[in-house]
């Protein structure tokens, strides 16, 4: 058997046994999408890498929720590939001079798939739902920012009032996480939204027909759809009759499904398989850099040992991020240096080589902290207690390659005498622990095409308990000041410079450890046409066709 260290140095290979588990085979034979539907204009089978933590974007935290529900739930605006904001459900808007009120003129003739009219009351109902305590929003509330209220001016005019300037609001308004449910669904089935299926009713070109937890989700075309955004590649109804999303968490299952033709598209092709699939007959690969935040380890700054910057820096020095990244991903991905991915506006490239991999420096800092003893297993001790840190995770929501990276970090920390316990939990237990701050490390990535994601991840007002995602539980007045200034800034360059200051402060204080820069690698069969990845590297289902 290979040792963990040898395994990390060599290429990752998938076994044939793992190609498709029982759940995937069940999904592939489901009556919900019969083989006859695979004719021209028929059904697209899509292999997804993770399962959403919730099918309600207002409550969800996982990026996959936004990706899969984009064809169902639409937004006020759309974001073009160059980052500019374009009309969608709102055909125009204006911002008050003080930056506190955004007034949208809504497009006429838009309906939800249940027949209800999309209007100002629908906007108000949805935004109020996002900030309601019962919703327990994990992502959408942060995008709304300092929301005060929504005012219905008339049926087709709505004013969103904020407590403070929020310069990223227009960008955020283009996100699926601020997409619109039918008011009837919010009123009568709010408790059912997270489970997905027929109660998730939107204005989009597809309806959410059904979901089988852990296996698949089925979306069907709306025949009367006629309000695509200006960024769309065509107009009118979707080209596909239906989309069947197979939830194939195992990398080998997705690769096996795409190579065998059991799916037409497979997302997040593992780095170890990209070279082998490129140029293969019948397959094409589409790649796009993922903007936002790299896969990152957040160190809990509110309890020992990571309440001391020396411990945080010691852990950072102890991990050979470049070596792990190269060993796992064979040069397909690059290691990360800063809190933002290079494809994100405002990314600070000066942070490259801001620290070094050095076990000697890690050892020096740990000795300085008093962890000078060693137990029988070789782990460091202080006053007879082992230096142990815990990282909870939810297996359903963490991709295989991210978990493999976690194992590499675990091994690196062991080499300097730190025991890292990787704790698999169910979703409810994980939420309970993170809300209470009962963890030492927490790891995740965060897609987003605007640097304001740093607000959600590092503002002292954005703790998990507040609906934010401040995984390091940072309370830093200097950061808060810069983040607030950035949100109030009217000049684009001034805003980006403030976010660069935020990035430098995060690295200086070692609040988190960015791991690697991923790309979205999507494989598709040659029968698929029109596949494109949007500004956030999500698949645009509306424009896809199959031959």
Image (spheres, rainbow, N blue to C red):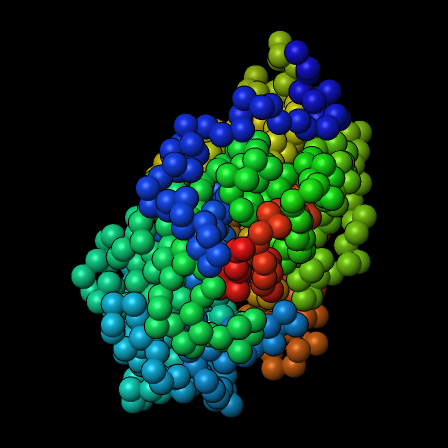
Q: Residue 202: which quarter of the image?
A: bottom left
Quadrant holding the N terminus? top right
**Above or below for 11 versus 465:** above
Q: Position of residue 359 (x, y in %)?
A: 77, 29
Q: Of all residues shown, which one is farthest toward the top? A: 376
Please tell me which residue is depicted at 75% across the width and 26% down the height of the picture. Answer: 9
Q: Residue 68: which quarter of the image?
A: bottom left
Q: Position of residue 304 (x, y in %)?
A: 54, 36
**Above or below for 230 versus 311:** below
Q: Position of residue 513 (x, y in %)?
A: 65, 44
Seen from the viewer's position, the closer of residues 164 and 105 is 105
**Above or below for 91 versus 197:** below
Seen from the viewer's position, the closer of residues 130 and 475 is 130
Please tell me which residue is depicted at 62% across the width and 50% down the height of the picture. Answer: 526
Residue 61 showing in the rendered view: no
Residue 232 showing in the rendered view: yes
Q: Is residue 154 left or right of residue 72?
A: left
Please tell me which residue is depicted at 30% across the width and 70% down the height of the picture. Answer: 112
Quadrant holding the C terminus? bottom right
């Amino acid at each position: 058997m290979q040792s963990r260290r040898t395994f990390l140095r060599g290429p990752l290979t998938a076994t044939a046994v793992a190609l498709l588990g029982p759940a995937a085979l069940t999904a592939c034979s489901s009556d919900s999408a019969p083989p006859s539907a695979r004719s021209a204009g028929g059904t697209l089978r899509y292999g997804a890498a993770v399962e959403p933590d919730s099918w309600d974007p207002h409550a969800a935290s996982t990026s996959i929720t936004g990706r899969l529900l984009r064809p169902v739930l639409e937004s006020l605006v759309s974001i073009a590939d160059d980052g500019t904001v374009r009309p969608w459900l709102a055909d125009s808007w204006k911002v008050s001079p003080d930056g506190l009120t955004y007034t949208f003129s809504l497009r006429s003739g838009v309906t939800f798939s249940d027949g209800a009219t999309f209007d100002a009351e629908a906007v108000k109902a949805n935004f109020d739902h996002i900030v309601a305590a019962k919703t327990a929003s994990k992502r959408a509330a942060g995008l709304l920012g300092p929301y005060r209220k929504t005012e219905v001016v008339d049926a087709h005019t709505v004013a969103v009032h904020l407590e403070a300037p929020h310069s990223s609001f227009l960008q955020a308004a283009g996100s699926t996480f601020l997409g619109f449910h039918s008011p009837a669904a919010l009123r009568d089935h709010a408790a059912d939204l997270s489970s997905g299926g027929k109660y998730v009713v939107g204005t989009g070109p597809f309806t959410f027909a059904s979901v089988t937890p852990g296996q698949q989700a089925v979306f069907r075309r709306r025949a009367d759809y006629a309000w695509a955004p200006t960024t769309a590649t065509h107009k009118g109804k979707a080209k596909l009759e239906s989309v069947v999303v197979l939830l194939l968490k195992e990398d080998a299952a997705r690769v096996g499904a795409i190579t065998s033709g059991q799916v037409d598209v497979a997302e997040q092709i593992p780095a170890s398989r990209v070279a082998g699939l490129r140029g293969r007959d019948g397959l094409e690969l589409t790649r796009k850099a993922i903007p936002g935040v790299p896969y990152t380890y957040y160190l809990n700054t509110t309890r020992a040992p990571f309440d001391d910057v020396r411990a945080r820096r010691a852990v950072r020095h102890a991990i050979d991020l470049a070596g792990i990244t190269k060993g796992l991903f064979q040069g397909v991905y690059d290691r990360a240096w800063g809190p933002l991915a290079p494809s994100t506006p405002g990314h600070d490239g000066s942070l490259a080589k801001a620290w070094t991999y050095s076990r000697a420096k890690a050892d020096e800092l740990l000795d300085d902290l008093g962890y000078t003893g060693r137990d029988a297993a070789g782990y460091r001790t202080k006053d007879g207690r082992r230096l142990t840190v815990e990282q909870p995770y939810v297996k359903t929501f963490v991709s295989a390659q991210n978990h493999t990276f976690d194992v590499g970090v675990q091994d690196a920390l062991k080499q300097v005498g730190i025991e890292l316990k990787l704790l698999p939990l169910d979703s409810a237990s994980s939420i309970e622990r993170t809300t209470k701050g009962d963890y030492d490390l927490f790891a995740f990535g965060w897609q987003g095409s605007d640097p304001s994601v740093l607000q959600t991840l590092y503002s002292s007002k954005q703790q998990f308990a507040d609906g934010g995602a401040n995984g390091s539980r940072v309370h830093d007045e200097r950061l808060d000041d810069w983040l607030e200034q950035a949100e109030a800034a009217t000049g684009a360059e001034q805003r980006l410079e403030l976010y660069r200051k935020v990035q430098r402060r995060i690295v200086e204080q070692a609040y988190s450890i960015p791991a690697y820069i991923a790309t979205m690698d999507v494989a598709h069969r040659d029968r698929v046409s029109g596949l494109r990845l949007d500004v956030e590297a999500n698949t645009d289902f509306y424009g896809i066709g199959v031959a």
